[in-house]
Image: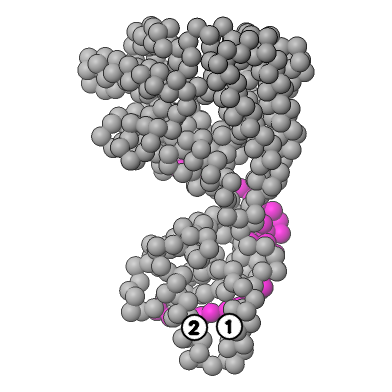
Amino acid sequence: MSKFYAYKELRERFPTKEAVSEARNRVETFISEISKRSSSRNAVVFGSAVWGTHPRIGDQHTRRSDVDVAIGQGYAGEELEKLCAQVTEQTGVPTEFTKVGIDGGMYDKTCFISPSTADHFRLLAGKFPKKPYEDFKKTMEVLAIPRAEDITNYVGRLSGNIGSDFHDLFVNRRHMDWTNPENLKLLAKLENFPDHFIRKILGMEKMLPCPDSKQVVWEVFSHFPYQWVAKEKLAGHFRSMRGCSAAYEKLIDEVSAGLSDWKYDCKFENIANDLILNAAACFSMIGHTESDLERILHITRIPKGTPVIILTHFGDGGGWVNAKRLDEDFGNPKAGVKYFVKNDPATPYEQKQYGQTEIPYFGGDNGLQRIDDPINPSRGWFTYKRSGSGFCSIRACDEATFQNLKGDLDKDDPDVRRAHYRSLANQALNPEYSRVPRKLLNRSAASV
């Protein structure tokens, strides 16, 4: 989480990326040394600061980043907390702890992590196979709630309801004491909201990028290839909130150049006010219930009326081709998106949310599980196991292609149909840009 500073802090110690790297390395070294005392490693550094230690990933943290530390069961948390306090005092870089599991000393209750934090550790384990992220991840207890509920709870905690920590922030934003560290922390959590919200919903859609840093996650959101209500409704406010972050970065430099405390306070108050107003606008659009969330997360892969090519793959290696117009949105069935809870093998304690959809043409395939998005949305096909038997692939096409193909198919010539199927199936079953079910991919190229 990025930190906001009181004017006095900036005058005493100017934040730098080098300081964040130094703090990260010192905490990491301490954990490595103390872990040698036991057979397992029960604390790790994670978050954006870690990505810069991977040889093929550049530094993803900023000069305002903190150092995130996950503390697991049985770990000597008090020693680590003391070291982190010293590091913060000497570098000015804050350290945030995420408690995992049970510890009889520092923590005395079971601590669960969110599904999105589990996603982050899965990415770390994939990029750092020789480091302890995979083993540490196994010690975690993931909050066993559906992802939609996790997102709803997250929004609810930040949205300023009466009694929440954020209520005064929204009601009295023009009269807040911005020298108070607790108020600055609350504001930082609001600043971080667009990034965390996007991470959570990309994790829900199995589209979380690696690294899952702020900039990379924003790029995925900004260039999302399908119609998405969240992007249409929230992108403008998210962009404004990112603009507040950029304005604050500029303000830090102005302090370094000699800006007075009075001018800093005035400019900071304006930035804080804009940040809070845009966050409030986002929360009003998202709503506070799972049905509200379902509406804002609605994704339309292929709009109603779009001409599409549909391939039906037979078990003998042959197939059938059709050219149709969609009766309804693909990814937005008539009955709305329904959800069911399914165990996620990647994180055994997690109950993961899957969408249910249908291919709404000519009667359609009803009751299908979630269909993976193509690797390349512009060239790829949606390929899925039918609700009965066999497999199908579907892809949108332009009007000219649709009319030409439909004209050939209307001739009802079996040889022409087979030729079109073979040509199109070679595209649809290409794993370079389409996600093809393994059973279907195992068919030999000759059979197609």
The residue type indicated by label 2 comes to His
235 is higher (above) or lower (below) than 367: above
Q: Mark 2 to mark 1: distance in Å?
A: 8 Å
Asked if disc 2 and disc 1 are in contact, CB closer than 8 Å, the reply is yes
Pick the residue in front: 104 or 113.
113
How many marks can you see?
2
Quick check: is 193 in the magenta stretch?
no
Q: Earlier in the sequence, mark 2 or mark 1?
A: 1
Residue 163 place in picture, x, y as percent: 72, 16
In which quadrant of the rendered image does the C terminus lie?
Answer: bottom left
4 is higher (above) or lower (below) than 404: above
The residue type indicated by label 1 comes to Leu
Residue 33 place in picture, x, y as percent: 24, 16
Q: Give the magenta part as a residue range.
A: 316-344
Residue at screen point 57% across, 45% down: 221
Q: Which mark is residue 420?
A: 2
Residue at screen point 56% across, 68% down: 395
Pick the residue in front: 222 or 250.
250
Residue at screen point 68% across, 26% down: 275
Q: Is residue 73 visible?
A: no
Residue 269 place in picture, x, y as percent: 70, 17
Pick the residue in front: 424 or 157.
424
87 is higher (above) or lower (below) than 303: above
424 is higher (above) or lower (below) than 303: below
Neighbour tally class for label 1: few under 14, some 14-19, many 20 plus, Cα within 10 Å = some
Badge 1 is on which residue? 405
Q: Is residue 48 visible?
A: yes
Q: Is residue 143 left or right of residue 178?
A: left
Task: Give the quadrant of residue 407.
Answer: bottom right
Under tag 1, what secondary structure? helix
Residue 411 place in picture, x, y as percent: 59, 92
